[in-house]
Amino acid sequence: MNIVSHIENINELEKSCESGIGEVIVSTKGLGRFGNMDIPTIKELAVRCRKLPLRPVLEWDILMTETVFRESVEILKAIPLKDFKAVRVVDPGAVRYLMKYMPEVKIQLVLENGNNNLRAIEMWRDIVSNHIDRIVLPREIPFHQLKKNLLNLGVETELYVFGRLPITYSPRKLLDRMGVPTGQNNEKKALAGTNELPGEIFEVIENENGTFMFHSRDLCLLEHMDEISGIGVNWARIDPIPGMDKRKFCKGPFQENLTDRKFSKLKNELLDTDHASYIGDVIEVKNGSHIAIYVKNKSAFVKMNMKLRFLTPEGKIKIGPVCFLKNSSWNDVDLIESGSLAFMNHLSGISNKTAVFMMDA
């Protein structure tokens, strides 16, 4: 199986060649998300690649508004694309532009985000058709699905096997207003956490193209290279990671969907609104006074002295009795049925959007 990797500067060419890399991804300012090389440098890099057994490919993967798109096209026109084996493209508008105005350019179609089923991949394959050089497969397809469907594509494929795992990418510069200092390559870096995953730290990077968040663990499928090659993947992408000896790794969804464990609180079976014990949701909380519950389930009700289970958005479970019960007219009642608001005594630790369940269902 062939190896493809990003290259950050021209001095890495010979080392890449010695490492057995067959293709290098070249990223330039205005086209690549983390592109730092200028046009004269990548021109020289492409020329040097001809003297080595290396394929240079140009990366065009930034998120683009109409203005940014026009600016990117002008940068693209200044680059001798004949010296590159292909252009790696994410944006559908960029795909259409290359097919219409630069039909001689081969396209590496990057489908890593979304397109997580065979029909979507086949659709893109058929759209790009004769222009296609390779399909970069989605990261969210587990191994057993790749094994079943890969040979049906009929084109060269690539799979990301080692490197940082992107979670989100926004063209907005989210760290600007936080006063984060600018570091090397005009980047701002910070660490972030979430309420859902206490203790998990995510790396956030901002540059001229926007803000990026990365998973707390990096992707590593190196021990499965023989399996990946065996099902017909032609290229494996391996990206360098700074400080690799201090990093933690995972296999992503390669063998299973790890979010079932990682985000178990968000996938708690009790959040299923078809669950027999589900009553409705908390829509108002007034400390020391009351909790307002909207009774959603058609067969559910709230009545005096019954015990309720509350599942907060953070995954915490609270249990408490209905000590007083009022309707929307603030009259005391013994029973509130589906489609109505139930006002009960306040319980600590309950917030809006908390799901409510019967204890004895």
Image: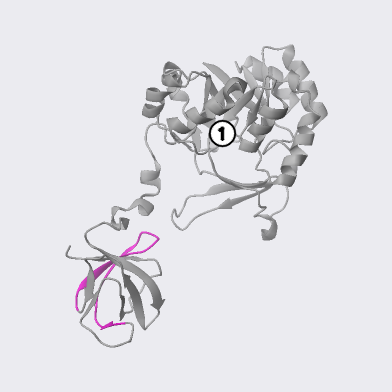
Q: From the viewer's perspective, is residue 224 above or below residue 266?
A: above
Q: Is residue 307 magenta?
A: yes
Q: Quadrant of residue 12?
A: top right
**Looking at this view, is 146 or 23 the one in front?**
146
Q: Quadrant of residue 321?
A: bottom left
Residue at figure coordinates x 39%, y 40% from the top left: 258
Magenta range is: 305-327
Mark 1 secondary-structure assignment: helix
Q: Is residue 298 left or right of residue 259?
A: left
Q: Provide residue 104's location: percent of width, then percent of height.
A: 70, 20
Q: Is residue 222 magenta?
A: no
Q: Quadrant of residue 107?
A: top right
Q: Is residue 347 left or right of residue 52?
A: left
Q: Amino acid at mark 1?
A: Met
Work out which residue is located at the far bottom of the displayed protein and give it.
331
User: What is the crowding at mark 1: few (fewer than 14 residues within 10 Å), some, or many (at least 20)?
Assistant: few
Q: From the viewer's perspective, is residue 4 above or below residue 314?
A: above
**Looking at this view, is 171 or 36 the one in front?**
171
Q: Is residue 41 left or right of residue 290?
A: right
**Looking at this view, is 188 or 3 the one in front?**
3
Q: Identify the colour scheme used.
A: one colour
Residue at figure coordinates x 80%, y 22% from the top left: 44
Q: Provide residue 137's location: percent of width, then percent of height.
A: 50, 29
Residue at figure coordinates x 28%, y 88% from the top left: 331
Q: Is residue 209 visible?
A: yes
Q: Say which residue label 1 marks.
A: 244
Q: Quarter holding the C terminus?
A: bottom left
Give the total number of marks visible in the rendering.
1
Q: Is residue 266 left or right of residue 185?
A: left
Q: Is residue 26 visible?
A: no
Q: Provide residue 349's location: percent of width, then percent of height.
A: 37, 70
